[in-house]
Amino acid sequence: MEYFNIFTHLVLVMALGWYLITNLQWYSYKLERVIFKHHKLHWHIIYFVTPFVMYYLLPSLYFLVYFYALYLPLLVLWNMKLDKPLVLTSRVQRFLAILLFVTFSISLLCFVSENCKSAGIFIPLFIAYLVSFSLERIFFISFKHRAKKRLQGIKDLKIIAITASYGKTSIKNYLYQILKSKFNAYKTPRSVNTLAGLVLDVNRDLPDNAEIYIAEAGARMQGDIEEISNFLHQDYAILGQVGEQHIEYFKTLNNIIHTKMEILKSPKMIKAFVHESVPILDYAKIEKFPNDLNITKSNLDGIWFDVNIDGKQEHFYAPILGSFNAVNLTACILMAKELGMSIDQIKIALNKIKPVEHRLQKIEAGGKVIIDDSFNGNFEGMLEAVNLCSEYEGRKVIITPGLVESTDETNILLAKEIDKHFDFVILTGSLNTHLFSDNIDKNKQFILKDKSKMEETLIEKTRAGDLILFANDAPNFI
C-alpha cells in the first residue's frame, strides 16, 4: 500500500503540474495573469484547489477513491475537450521533466526518512516552477543575444515593425504580399508578436538572403513594445489604429496609446507611418495616414478606394472584404512606395492580393456563403462584418462569442446590431451569453455550450442559400 500511495502522490503532482503549465501556456507564462485574469476561475477551484484540500483533509483511502474515481477522470475529460490543448514545446517538456524529477526525489527521501509523514504537493510544484522559470530566463538571454547577432549579420536587411490595437496582422500579411512581388521579403508567421516569439523566429526561420523582415509587435503591458524595438532596431514602422482593445490590461486608452507609440523608439528609424487616431506631433520622419482616403465601393466582391499620394489622387482595388481594410492597405501602399515600388507595381500586387485566413475570408461550400471572420476580435471590425453581411439578400446566420477583451456596453451595442441584421444567432462560450441573450430576439437565438457540437449544430440549423458569418472565436478557456 505504501508503494501505491507514493505512485498516487507522483500522479497527483504531475496532474496538477499539467493543469498549471497548460494555463501558463495560454497566458504567455505569466503566473499573475493565470491567477488574476483567467476567465474561468471555477476551473482553478475544481482542478487545482480542490485536490489540494482533499489531499490533506481526507483519510488516505477516501482520497484514493476521490482521486481515481472522480478527479483524474474529470481532468482527462477536461483536457480532451479543450479546443486549445497543451502544446508539448521544449519549454513544457523541460518543466514536466523537472517536476517529475523533483517529485520523485522528494517522495524517495520521504520514504527513507522515519520522520517524514507526507511528501507534500506544493513544494515540488513550487521548486519545479522556480527552477523552470530561472532556466528559461537564462536560455532566453542567450537566444536573444544570438538572434540580435543574426539580424546584424544579414547584409542590407531592412526591418519593418508593425503594431496597432487591431489590424496589425492584416497589415503585415497585406504588406508582405505587396513587397514579395519585388523583394525577397519575409514576415513573422501567424500572430507571432511577442519578444520571445520574435527571438525564436529570427533564430529558426528568418532566411539568410532576406531583404526585408516584416515583424508584428504586440503588447500586454507598458514597455513590451519598447523591448521589441530595442531588439529589432527597425528601420521602418507602421503604427495602425489605436483603440480600447485589451483595455483590461492597460486600464486607460492613454496607456494603450503610449505603449503603441513605443514602436517609434528605434534608434535606426528612417520613416514611420502613423494612423491619424494617434495624437502625435508632426516630425520629419513621421507621415500620417490614411491620406484623404475615399472608399468608393465595398461589397462581397472587394473594395475600391482612392488615396492622395504626392498631391495626386490614385485609384486602387483589392479583392478583399471590409471597407476598414482600405485603411490597412493605405499604410501598405505608402510603405511599399517608400521602399521604391512604383504605383503601377503596387496596383498590380493589390489586384492579386489574397485575404488573410480567418479575417473576412469568403468561402463558398455546400450552397452556402461562409464569411470566416473568426480571428477578428475588435468592435469596429466586427461591426463592419455585420454591416457587410447585411447586404446579402438571403437568410443570414452568425456564430459568435461576442467581444472578449471589451466592455459590457460595447458588447450590448454589437448585440443590438446583430439582432437588427441577422435572422439566426448562434452564441458560443459563456463570457457574453447573458448580454447577447438579453439583447437579441429569443426566437432567433441558440446557445451552443459545447463547441465540439458545432458541425452538427450547423447541419441542423442552417440550409443551402444561407450566409454564415463566423464572428470572432474565443478558445473555450475564455
Image: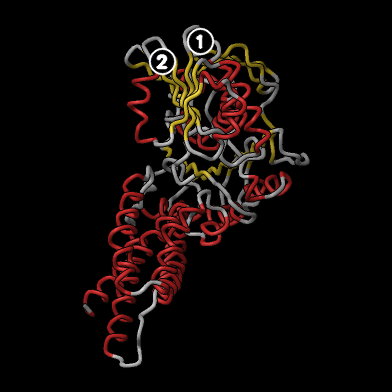
Tell me the kind of residue under disc 2: Val
**In this view of the protein, which residue sits in the foreground, 402 or 87?**
402
In this picture, residue 64 sits left or right of residue 317? left
Residue appearing at x 38%, y 71% in the figure: 58
Whether residue 339 is visible to the viewer of this picture, yes or no, is no
Q: Which residue is mark 1?
A: 392
Mark toward the start of the polypeptide (1 vs 2): 2
Residue appearing at x 58%, y 36% in the figure: 166
Q: Which label belongs to residue 460?
A: none
Q: Which label belongs to residue 369?
A: 2
Residue appearing at x 55%, y 37% in the figure: 168
Hey, which residue is sitting farthest bottom in the picture?
114
**In this view of the protein, which residue sits in the foreground, 352 or 396?**
396
- The Cα atoms of the two marked residues, 1 and 2, are separated by 10 Å
Q: Can you give x and y, in whole percent of width and height, for residue 355 in the image? A: 45, 25
Q: Secondary structure at mark 2?
A: strand
Whether residue 140 is visible to the viewer of this picture, yes or no, is yes
